[in-house]
Image (cartoon, rainbow, N blue to C red):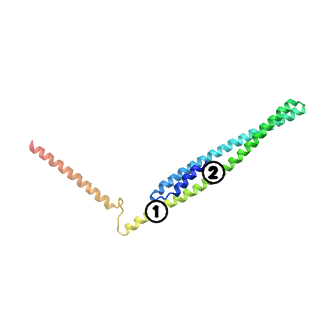
Amino acid sequence: MFERLRDALRAALDAATPPADLRQLAGQMREAVVDAKVAVREVREALKRTEVEVAAERQKLADAERRGRLAGEIQDAETVEVASRFAAKHRDRVAMLEKKLAAQQEELSLAEKELNEMQSQLSVADQSRVGSERSTEDAWREIQRAGGTRPGVDPEDDLLKSQMERAQREAAADRQLDELKKKFRKD
């Protein structure tokens, strides 16, 4: 059940991704963890349903055995025979359901173990991503301390940009004013 999720997670982890893709990788890992959580929940629900089935089948077995004993006490051979056939059928079904229950318990245990591994891998990836982002920030701070500027962050860049935009607007307004003056002179 989890092979697809595990393969997707491994493929994402094994891929040689540059640091810029760490956020995307972490997102893929989160999706895989969410899918695994859903799968674990579904296995738990199936396990509960099987437990209910086992309990119901055990009750049917007990009823069939009780009916057979009661029929034996009144010496009703036909009812004893029918009750023993039903008891055998329910005994076989209980055995099968107990095997199914054991398999589901193993599956749940494995799924929970895999989910925990995936969550710890995601935690490591998140820490690596945060560490990478932090180291990028540290590098920009070092550049700024050395006298360099970071594009898009330098307040003088914004000031210069706004001054240039204002000059362009004023030039456009001057052109429009000149055109209007020419127009009025012609009239």
Q: Which residue is found at the position 46% from the left and 56% from the top?
A: 21
Q: At 38% across and 67% down in the image, what residue appears?
A: 143
Judge whether residue 63 can be spotted in this image: no
Residue 134 disc label: 1
96 relative position to 14: left or right: right
Q: CA distance from mark 1 to mark 2?
A: 34 Å
Callout 1: helix, strand or loop? helix
Q: Is 37 located above or below residue 152 in the figure?
A: above
At label 1, the amino acid type is Arg
Category of crowding for the residue at label 1, using alpha-carbon neighbours closer than 10 angstroms: few (below 14), some (14–19), many (at least 20)? few
Position of 45 compared to 161: left or right?
right
Q: Which mark lies nearer to you, 1 or 2?
A: 2
Which class describes the residues within 10 Å of circle 2: few (<14), some (14-19), or many (20+)? Answer: many
Give the residue displayed 70% in from the left and 42% down from the top: 50
How far across and down, in percent of the image, does residue 22 sit? 48, 57
Identify which residue, 32 or 85, lies in the foreground: 85
Horizontal arrangement in the rendering, residue 181 relative to residue 73 (left or right): left
| Residue underneath mark 2 | 111
